[in-house]
Each structure stands twice: as C-alpha cells, then as structure tokens.
Image (spheres, grey):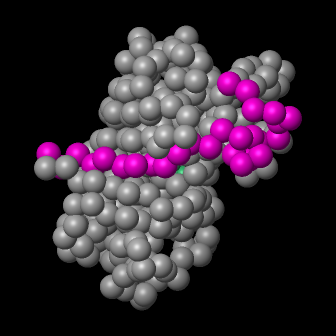
Amino acid sequence: MLLRFTKMHGLGNDFVVIDGVSQGVTMTPELARKLGDRRFGIGCDQILLVEPPTTHDVDFRYRIFNQDGSEVEQCGNGARCFAKFVRDRHLTGKSDIRVETASGIITLHVRRNNLIEVNMGVPVLEPEKIPFLADHRQTRYPIEVLGQQLLVGAVSMGNPHVVLNVESTATAPVDTLGPALEGHALFPNRVNVGFMEVLNRHEINLRVYERGAGETLACGTGACAAAVAGQLQDLIDSTVTVNLPGGSLEVSWSGEGEPVIMTGSATTVFHGRIRI
Ligand SMILES: N[C@@H](CCC[C@H](N)C(=O)O)C(=O)O
C-alpha cells in the first residue's frame, strides 16, 4: 500500500502527519518506528494520525506515536500541526476545532495571523495521576538520579513531565540527566524531562528531553509544564514567552483549576507517499 503523508513541524519538533479519515491506516508500533526512522524511513520525532471522531461532539480524533513506537496521550506542537493539516487538506473549514486525544478533548483556534491557539486543558498536579510515585503533592520533589539529589517539579499536561530549574540551558546536562530521568523508577510510564532557565518573570528558556524521542528542538506540552512549574514556584507571571532551541511559544496559565493556553506556529514541509 502507498501511504500518503505530510511532513510538518512546530518549531523544529517534526512530524509525519497521516490522514486516516480518507485513507485506511492501521498504525502499529512497528509501522510508527519505520516511518519515524531518519535513515530507513521518513524521519520525525512523532507520527500524528488524524482519524474520524468516536463521539458526536468533536470534529476529529488525533493519535500520537513517538519515534520509538509508543502511543502517547498528548503533544502540543503536534496539536498545532494537526489544526493546520485538517484545514489545509480541506478536512474541515472550521477555525475552532474540537479534537479527541488519548488524554481527553482539547480545543484549537486558528487565528487570522495563522498562529494557532490551543487550550491544552487543566494541568494535573496530583502525583498518582501524573503518574509519579510520591506520598503527597509538593511544588518540588527531591529525587536521586545518577548519584545527585535534585529538586524537580512534576506536572501532567495529559502526558507526564518533570521540570528542573537550571542556571543556563546552554550548559544543562540534558544528555545525561535526560535519559536517566526519563526511565527513572519513580515514573511508571516514563517521563518527559524539561530543563528551565528563568530569564525574568515573562520569559524562560527551555530544553526538553522527550520520552520516546530524545531531545527535540521544541516540546509544546513541555513548555506548558514549565510555565506551570515556574508559576507554582512564583518565579514567573501568568503569561510567559518560552524560548526553545527551535523557536518561541507563548504560554498562559491563570492558576489552579484553569486550563493552559499555548500559542505558536505550525509549518508544512512537504507531502509524500511511502510504500508500507
Ligand atoms: N513533542 C510533543 C510531545 C510528544 C509526546 C512526548 N514525547 C511524550 O512521550 O509524552 C509536544 O510538543 O508536546
């Protein structure tokens, strides 16, 4: 079978996006790994599969697979690319789109300037729901990794994140602490690892070592998790610019019980077909 796909990115976090509405696709971990392989396949950080909805009150179902084949709950940069994809491919004409993900329904708004605003939902802070093995909720948790005692924030944006405060993202030990924390025994489903440098109350730098993909040029849910973790420590205000290696996002959070709003761009690179 020849599978039609579109290569897209959100600030360099790159995706193979597949229209599963007008072509039949059965995604498996093996197929996701093949598509994601940068040498033997197309190459991407995540594979996004757009499907018809399974309930009446949403427009689409959107599934996310990491490069390592694991299916995951949420992807912020992917959500913006999903919105651009369904409009560009004429799967919808709406500028407000509701979509089912594995972690619930999110809503997206495509602005006139083509930036996409995503309501990423209410962050989850209870350890057992992240999931994170801790006795009780704290702003920062002590954790031992590679012989060091660290303090980390823990947040779920549908998918699990830890956030470390660092002096400088340029020198942060992303390559060593990233994989060590990703597979840490206290995170039963593994975890995405953010390294946050607070520049001032309105701006942070961030690098993210993603679960199932390694360090990426940007992580949308990571940006949201860092904004939440930074605000809970009273280091930043409710709206921040998050500078990632691939570009910047704006993230707003009005506090406990409120949803996180993320705004940024989405870019199409090319369309193709691959025999599977
Ligand atoms: N790149 C994404 C997150 C993709 C999923 C993540 N690696 C996970 O395993 O949870 C984003 O932009 O949010």
- The structure residue drawn at horizontal position 68% and vertical position 24%, both measured from the top left corner, is 139
Position above or below: 43 against 168: below
Position above or below: 29 against 275: above
Position in image of residue 192 (x %, y %): 61, 41
For the question of whether residue 163 can be seen, the reply is: yes
**In this picture, residue 252 sits left or right of residue 112:** right
Residue 269 appears in which quarter of the rendering?
Answer: bottom left
Position in image of residue 146 (x %, y %): 80, 26
**In this picture, residue 251 sits left or right of residue 160:** left
Position in image of residue 57 (x %, y %): 41, 74
Position above or below: 273 against 7: below
Magenta-span inclusion, residue 101: no
Residue 89 appears in which quarter of the rendering?
Answer: bottom left
**In this picture, residue 6 sits left or right of residue 145:** left
Magenta-span inclusion, residue 121: yes
For the question of whether residue 221 can be seen, the reply is: no
**In this picture, residue 229 sits left or right of residue 85:** right
Position in image of residue 62 (x %, y %): 45, 67
- The structure residue drawn at horizontal position 57% and vertical position 27%, both measured from the top left corner, is 229
- The structure residue drawn at horizontal position 56% and vertical position 64%, both measured from the top left corner, is 102
Q: Number of callouts in the render?
A: 0
- Magenta residues (range): 113-139
